[in-house]
Amino acid sequence: MLVPLLAAGSLLLGAALPGGAPSPAPVRYAGLTSCPGANGKRHICGPWRLWLRGGGTVQLKDAQIRSLDARGREEVQRAPVAVDPYGRHVAYFAASDRRLVVRNVGSGGLTRVPGTAGRLPSGLRMSDVELRVGPEGRYLVLDPTRSSTRGVLVIEVATGKAWTLPAYASVQGFSPEGRLLRVVLDQEESAVYRPGGAVPSAGVTVVGWGALTSDGATVAGAAREGSRVLVRFYATSNAMESRAPVRVKVPPAEEPRMLRWDSGSRMTLLTFDEPRRFVARSVEVRGGGARMVDSFTVGRHTWDVHLAGD
């Protein structure tokens, strides 16, 4: 299903929202729609869009759609975008000056990353990098996925301060308030990283999709084990399981796709049902209960989907 250009409840983001405008619902995902062409083939119908919980859409009128190469020439590939895990901020390259920006979806406020950190690293194409933005829009991660010689860049959005991680470390998530990062070492162990500090040399082996607590003391992992999805909890201090796992009843057709901490006792588990349906469940850590809080289906003519927190 194509989302109309100005669907009911949709907003335009290319400038700050007018004062007093209501905050939209959290973003489920970002993507591009497609339209049929004269030759029967479909083509991109820009701009980038944000699909909101509740059914509305937001257009990112100022976001770069197609990748630019190191010389500034447009390519077929798409430029990167990213939505924070709670659907409140989105990061992208601005089309006007090709600089990295982070936009608050609720207020429309835009923060341009200052200094050299706000520009595409020299010698790279936009399609060579992936973006990841943390809660509150505090940190932005630029991952040169197609370069074997460059490390992941962690950027403090407000100041432009940047730290390059060693080649063995990648960023896979954030703590709920965004001050701590969950890094994966050598594609195996999860560890806690505070920007500006040392990158740990060892971590915790987590099964499934991981999530980090606010204090960095616990990493959780969600994976299907038989007829249920199990959420296991590991202490980062000793890499041991720290409490009994929580068992979540999930239909066999659904597989875990993402996990996040919402508070000290509550998490959200996102599952994926082929080919395009997603279900979010709120999981009570202490009591073990779970209830569905959201479900949505990505339209078959929606391309380049970026889930919140992906």
Image (cartoon, rainbow, N blue to C red):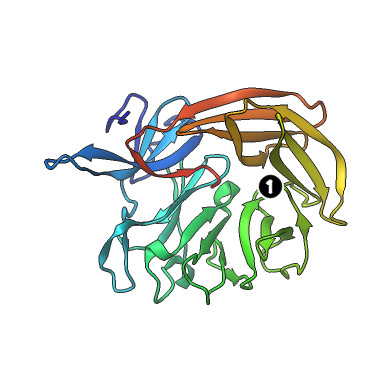
Position above or below: 213 against 163: above
Residue 23 seen anywhere in this rendered image of the structure: no
Local SS, label 1: strand
Closer to the camera in the image, 80 or 252? 252
Residue 127 point in image, percent of width and height: 39, 62
Closer to the camera in the image, 102 or 39? 39
In the image: residue 245, left or right of residue 302: right
Say which amino acid is labelled 1. Gly
Q: Which residue is mark 1?
A: 210
Asked which quadrant contains residue 48, the reply is top left
Residue 95 point in image, percent of width and height: 31, 57
Quarter of the N terminus within the rendering:
top left
Position above or below: 231 against 68: above
Residue 227 point in image, percent of width and height: 70, 29
Residue 235 point in image, percent of width and height: 84, 50
Closer to the camera in the image, 192 or 156? 192
In the image: residue 38, left or right of residue 42: left
Farthest residue, direction front: 226
Q: Residue at x 27, y 33 (%)?
A: 5
* Crowding at mark 1 (Cα within 10 Å: few <14, some 14-19, many 20+): many
In the image: residue 50, left or right of residue 145: left
Residue 179 seen anywhere in this rendered image of the structure: yes
Q: Residue at x 88, y 56 (%)?
A: 238
Position above or below: 115 against 255: below
Q: Residue at x 62, y 28 (%)?
A: 252
In the image: residue 209, left or right of residue 305: right
Q: How many marks?
A: 1
